[in-house]
Image: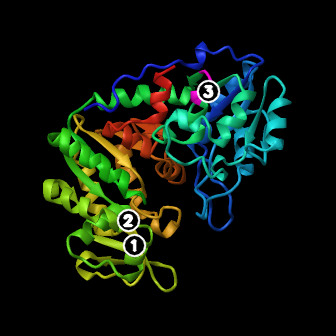
Amino acid sequence: MAGQGEIRFKSIDQLDVAGRRIAVRVDLNSSIDPQTGKVQLNERFRAHSVTVKELIERGGKVVVLAHQGRRGDPDFTDLSQHAEILSSLVGERVRFVPDVVGAEAVNAIKNLPKGEAILLDNVRKLEDEDVDKSPDEHAKSTLPRTLAPLLDAFVLDAFSVAHRGHSSIVGLAALLPTYAGRVMERELSAINKMIAMTDKIVFALGGNKPKECVNVLERFIKERPKSVHSVLTGGVLGQLFIKSRGYSLGAPSEDFLTKKKHVDFLGKVSEIDKRIGDRVIVPLDFAYAGKDGSRMEVTVEGLPSPGEIQDIGSRTIQRYREVIEGLERDTSVIVKGPMGVYEKPEFRKGTQSVYMALAKTRAATLIGGGDSVTAIEILGLRPSDFTYVSLGGGALISFLSGEPMPGLQVLAKQ
């Protein structure tokens, strides 16, 4: 199994940009500081600014499309701050338009001068945006139906959302000539090379999206079981493995897992444990917030935890570091998600220790996911400290799992 295999596509080298209206779908989704409400600068902004800047310099009339969060979530907001950050990186003003498909957006596109760019508002404000449909079905959705007649071409630059069959990803591609941007090109090339390097893989899986982690483990166990050397578990996945082994995590954590429907994956987690349990390394202890908000730790044997679990504990950190430090050059480490709630300084210890060890390992390291990218920034590390840092989290997992990726499929059809 080697992901999707070779994906053939047209790049923006083949696109006549000057004077043409070009929509470019990027991924500027970022963490938001809970205290200040400020959008955090991450590597996605830097990477996509390269594509946007090139299109501007080549005389395009650039319409940037992006999302932030999901409806109903605390990080669901407009893209005004994103426009400011992007402008500072591009070196030219990227004007924010507080509209997606209304009169203001339409007029902004129609009147956009050559060599300038605008950023439309959060595409997920449209109810038919983040619904998985085929390109032909989404061609009739609000965004493609309204914007395609105003545009000359579509550039898909966001590998990180290519696993989604959403309107702004596949709908415009059904109606317009479609090209891969610089980020998309780089991601596909680097990941294919990384996968080809080894058949000995260590997974370090955390974050708050256990479905993605479960999917890739299931596929590797099915198709390349001998390649799975070991699995370091943190975040929600680590809690699920502990729960599947009969421990009670405590009411605060149990309620969180139930509310987010993460408990729905307990059956699959148990099955993975049965198949490769000897290679799954689970937390030995956890960290939670005490009454005063300070970091407290509890061993697995000492569960249930009186507070919501927010990080792996000190014993677990030491164990994971030992595993990483013992890896050889013939191994690849695939990392998806942080070990805990790294946004809070008191619960950053697990992610920081593991990522620091990964930065020094002799093994090849492939880091994926928006939270992982942001964590690298916060920890003072650089993408160059790792073999490759992918901007895709779920997309990377889908690619590695060999699952159909609508964004790559529309590129391949051009």
Q: Residues within 10 Å of mark 2 (few under 14, many from 20)?
A: some
N-term-proximal mark, 3 vs 2: 3
Image-quadrant location for residue 297:
bottom left
Image mark for residue 258: 1
Q: Position of residue 249 (x, y in %)?
A: 32, 77
**Amino acid found under the numbered disc labelled 1:** Thr
In the rendered image, the vertical position of residue 412 relative to residue 129, given as above or below: above
Tag 2 and tag 1, C-beta contact below 8 Å: yes
Q: Is residue 125 within the magenta segment?
A: no
**Which residue does the image show at 78% across and 18% down from the upper left?**
19
**Amino acid found under the numbered disc labelled 3:** Leu
- The residue carrying mark 3 is 175
SS for dot 1 = helix
Instruction: Please report the bounds of the magenta region as a residue range.
Output: 173-177
In the rendered image, the vertical position of residue 116 relative to residue 212, given as above or below: above
Q: Position of residue 398 (x, y in %)?
A: 37, 41
State which mark lies toward you, 3 or 2.
3
| Count of number-bearing discs | 3
Q: Can residue 305 be seen in this snapshot?
A: yes
* Residue nearest the viewer, comparing 379 with 367: 367
**Amino acid found under the numbered disc labelled 2:** His
